[in-house]
Amino acid sequence: MSGTSGDGVDAAILDTDGENEIQLLGGLTLPYSDDLRWRVLEASQHDVPIIELLRLEKELSRHHAEALLELLKRPVPGDRPVEVIGFHGHTIRHVPTEGLTLQIGNPWMLHEATGVPVITDFRRHDMVLGGHGAPLAAMFHQAIFANDAKPTMVLNLGGVANVTWLGDGQAIIAGDCGPGCGLLDEWAQEMANLPHDRDGHLAASGNVNWPIVEAALDTEFFRSPLPKSADRYDFDHVDVSGLSVEDGAATLCAVTVQAVVRATGGLPAIPSKLWVSGGGVHHPVIMEMLRQHFQVVENVSQRGLSPDTLEAECFAWLAARRLLGRPIAIPETTGCRRAACGGSGTGAC
């Protein structure tokens, strides 16, 4: 998959029964060139000509195929063949209030490059059923953390932040909660000519402007309960342009964390532990701010999981569930009217 940060393709391989048996077998990230990344982000934010979008889709698909071929060179236990590929693609538009979403990527290019059936188009059935189409990682999180003490919560910090709350029994609540690292990445790129706030150097040298944080969170989205979903660019109203580079970075970190805290406040119980994945797990300031609000905050790597490829592993798991005809979302995770399967296939699917 290609996440909303638009920095490259994440690919992963796993052995699973589509339920709780999940063996992670490794993954990789194939970065985009600067030019491709700029075109991905441009198309994600602005209306580009259809011909340019088609050319971008072709190049993105080729990049995904290269990542898959590189991954498939690696040996797996028993030298077993890969049975199916889950292909999320890249989200160009996501407007859950109108039931609209668009992920680009040609699954037939992946199928022809690998000879393996491909499952794609995971989100649109959920949206037809009144769901937000995202986040789709919640049931995967439930399977991975099935044996953890409850309540516990998983936070994914990509371009957008989303949480999965897991309670006793099969209790689950999920949703997007606010900006992840998307705003911070843009700030570092525009103001410091950096791809991102590497090692948190900018934010660590700044001070949080709390009035700006409060103003940023004073919208209907942040007042709405989970489940809910958002596009990366739904948070462009957050304005730190009057601050120094360092203070702006620190303030954007605080917006991200306070959005998580607000979402948690509406849950049935405060989680005993917060597991963090995604690019934001590598940002020390964000992680320290989270520790000020949650009793235990851990990188998912402490569980032998990869914070960088966990979402790719999720879509491999969802592809297996599609083959089995099992739900990939339920009302508590996306707001859909009923539990439903999702995805369509190429090849033998």
Image: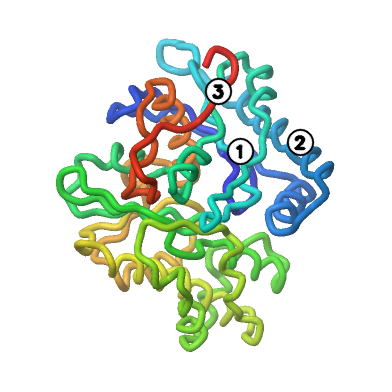
Q: Is residue 29 above or below residue 62?
A: below
State the quadrant of the N terminus: top right
The amino acid marked with disc number 3 is Gly
The amino acid marked with disc number 1 is Gly
Q: Is residue 157 above or below residue 265?
A: above
Q: Residues within 10 Å of mark 3 (few under 14, many from 20)?
A: many
Residues marked 3 and 2 touching at CB (< 8 Å): no
Mark 3 or 2: in front is: 3
Q: Residues within 10 Å of mark 1 (few under 14, many from 20)?
A: many
Residue at screen point 57% across, 76% down? 238
Nearer the observer, 37 or 324: 324
Q: Which residue is mark 3?
A: 345
Judge from the rendering whether residue 326 lies leftward or rightward of residue 110; answer left or right.
Answer: left
Residue at screen point 50% across, 16% down? 82
The amino acid marked with disc number 2 is Glu
Q: Which residue is mark 1?
A: 89
Residues marked 1 and 2 touching at CB (< 8 Å): no
Q: Position of residue 46 (x, y in %)?
A: 74, 58
Q: Position of residue 289 (x, y in %)?
A: 39, 71
What secondary structure is marked by label 1? loop
Numbered mark located on residue 147 in the image: none
Residue at screen point 50% across, 30% down? 343
Q: Does residue 219 appear anywhere in the picture?
A: yes
Report how far apart the C-alphas of labels 3 and 2 lie in the structure: 21 Å
N-terminal of the two: label 3 or label 2?
Answer: 2
Q: Which residue is mark 2?
A: 59
N-terminal of the two: label 1 or label 2?
Answer: 2
Report how far apart the C-alphas of labels 1 and 2 lie in the structure: 12 Å
Residues marked 3 and 1 touching at CB (< 8 Å): no
Q: Residues within 10 Å of mark 2 (few under 14, many from 20)?
A: some
